[in-house]
Amino acid sequence: MSQFPTMPVGVDRHIADTAHMTNEEAGAYFRLQVFAWRSPGCCLPDDDIRLARMLGTTPKRWATLKPIVLANWTLIEGNWRNDQVAREHQFVSEKVERKRAAGKLGGRPKPLELQDAGEALGSEIEKQTESETKAAKAKATYTPIVPTGDEPEGFPKFKAVYPKRNVAFPTTLARKRWREACRRGASPDEIIAGATAYAAEQRRIGKVGTEFVKTADAWLNQQRWRDYAPGATDPPAPPAAPVPDETWRERVRRWKATGGHWPWKGSDPPDSPKTGVPRHILDECGIGSPSGRPELRLAGVA
């Protein structure tokens, strides 16, 4: 292995030196520079056979390449030397020597008696400051989040009875909504009773474990337990307004004229035993008693 495994390359200088060469000639030129870098004395022997072997070519082909490739090389005492490689090798050698000399000092400040008082003081202050900084960093520790208290009253039971959904129970949000509901005056028992009834309803209609179950936090925020309080039912529908006699007469006339078509679904047609048409309207229109399948007289019907 070479003493210096990394060879610096002056890109601009290299391009200028090889601009007139073919790719083959430029490749041979650079390859010989690498061999020179790895060789003792940073030079190559004046031996065409060995140089051809270094390039992986034949002596005949090397004879053709040699005048161009070695134009920037100098033959000194039987060895070919390249100025660029020699300069880079000297630069790297000096740099390595400087690092070795610095390494022998261990990278530490000189003894106080061998350096200026100002430099010594500065070194000591710097070391002290560095130590204090490291100590300060060492004091920084992770502070875990401490729970603020136990679960609110009744919340664990609410969580247990609430119907399952297709996702995990939103404990944090539900706990927050639970506290808000209790602050507004709702009692835990009231909410739990509503949640129990809601769970029973969801089981009955087959929605437990699906996305159709309302999330617990939304259910609490909307105060849905009130929908399942005892006696909480939908208000009865208001009674239908009575149909005026003239409307009944018009409907019966249209029923007779269309051959028995009765589009009003709120009541049965006049020929039904359950018809809602008043008795006196049937008599006026010439329709017998609807009980017992009467004989109907549909005037005007073909």
Image (spheres, rainbow, N blue to C red):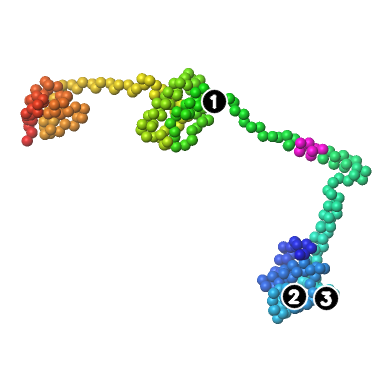
Q: Which of the two discs, 3 and 2, labels the residue nearer the N terminus?
A: 2
Q: Which residues are magenta?
A: 128-135
Q: Which of the two discs, 1 and 2, labels the residue nearer the N terminus?
A: 2
At label 2, which amino acid type do we have?
Leu
**Is 56 covered by the magenta stretch?**
no
The answer to whether residue 6 shows anywhere in this view is yes
- The residue that appears at 49% across and 35% down in the rendered structure is 168
| Element class at badge 3 | loop
Q: In the rendered view, does 288 fall on the left or right side of 75?
A: left
Closer to the camera in the image, 188 or 177: 188
**Is 134 covered by the magenta stretch?**
yes
Residue 147: horizontal and vertical position, in percent?
59, 28
- Rate crowding at label 3 as few (under 14), some (14 to 19) or many (20 or more) other CA atoms within 10 Å: few
Residue 199: horizontal and vertical position, in percent?
41, 29
| Residue for badge 1 | 151
Residue 261, relative to residue 107: is it above or below?
Answer: above
- The residue that appears at 30% across and 21% down in the rendered structure is 236
Q: Quadrant of the C terminus?
A: top left
| Residue for badge 3 | 78
Closer to the camera in the image, 291 or 153: 153
Residue 185: horizontal and vertical position, in percent?
48, 18
Disc sitting over residue 49 in the figure: none
| Residue for badge 2 | 51
Q: Residue furthest right?
A: 113
